[in-house]
Image (cartoon, rainbow, N blue to C red):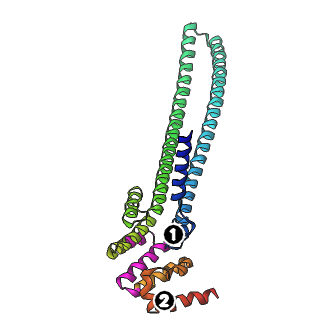
Amino acid sequence: MKTILSILIFFSVVVFANTPKDSDINAKVDSLQKPLYNPFVENYILNELKQLREENRDLKIELYNTLAKKEIEISNNAINYATSTINNMFYIIAAASSIFVIIGWGSLRDINEKITNIVNDRVAKVVDDYEKRMHSIEKDLEDRSKQVRMNQQAIEETNTIHSLWMRASQESTPSGKIEIYDEILELRPNDVEALTYKSDAILDMGEANWALNLTNQAIDIDDNYPNAYYQRAKVYSVLGHLDNALSDLEKAIDTNDQYIKEIKNEEEFDILVNNNMLDDLLSKYTKDAV
């Protein structure tokens, strides 16, 4: 009993000693330079996943409704064809009997053969019509199945990409982020968001020309994506192309004025801030806001 008590006291002391102090936690929070995650990215991925799930659900509902309608239609047609065939057979027999009485055919066997041939022809036409209808239904079901499989693959791909974005938001090193962005680009080569964030990580590693090439690719894919212009403005500022940097900043702010609050917090724009080159640009938006 004493031994167990001693072990519990020992673990309690160890846990208490390893518990971080409030001052250490506050110091780490104050030292943060960037947000730990990007809510806009998560919201974008979640919305896309939600939309794919809704499309898959609607597609399944439409498929089930179509199958139910087809089954009802086939049953009705079968009943109608059976009724019509039986009625026609009676009409044919009655007509044949009348002709036999009037014309005086010499053999009931001839009448039987005529009736059999007529019935066989009618049945063959009905069977052929059913085969055509069933082939059409099978083709429609096959197309629907392909669409369902494509939607399932899209959902799986979206889940994978979402998990990769979560990993990237938790990664602290630029090289680690680049590896994750490369995995996203393998799944979606034209993902402008992944290209832009990869450019930002590469710029942190000091590869400005490489980062510029990536931002140009992103803008070629989607020239209305404001973050690509904002990122290219950072690259131009680092390379010393200040006029190009101001031009891209203006395009980014015209689409999303939230970048105004971030400009002075980016060290890549220090040269523009120190040379007062941003004053005219920012004053224009300040006047518009007033």
Looking at the image, is 206 positioned above or below residue 183? below
- Mark 2 lies on a secondary structure that is loop
Q: Nearer the viewer, residue 191 or 63?
A: 191
Q: Nearer the viewer, residue 237 or 246?
A: 237
Nearer-N-terminus badge (1/2): 1
Say which mark, if any, is on residue 278.
2
Amino acid type of the residue that numbered disc 1 sits on in the rendered structure = Lys
Q: How many marks?
A: 2
Looking at the image, is 223 positioned above or below residue 240? above
Quadrant position of residue 191: bottom left
Q: Nearer the viewer, residue 62 or 188?
A: 188
Span highlighted in magenta in the image: 214-243
Residue 228 in view, yes or no: yes
Looking at the image, is 78 positioned above or below residue 238? above
Q: Quadrant of the C terminus?
A: bottom right
User: Outermost residue, front direction?
Assistant: 2
Q: Residue 151: x and y, percent?
A: 51, 48
Q: Residue 110: x and y, percent?
A: 54, 11
Q: Residue 257: x and y, percent?
A: 56, 79
Amino acid type of the residue that numbered disc 2 sits on in the rendered structure = Leu
Residue 224 in view, yes or no: no
Q: Residue at x 48, y 51 (%)?
A: 154
Instruction: Look at the magenta stretch and give its main secondary structure.
Output: helix
Q: Residue 83: x and y, percent?
A: 67, 23
> How far apart are the two marked residues, 1 and 2, measured between alpha carbons?
32 Å
Let me know if residue 114 is in the magenta part.
no
Q: Which residue is mark 1?
A: 28
36 on left or right of 244? right
Let me know if residue 233 is in the magenta part.
yes
Q: Nearer the viewer, residue 52 or 156?
A: 156
Say which mark, if any, is on residue 280.
none
- Mark 1 lies on a secondary structure that is helix
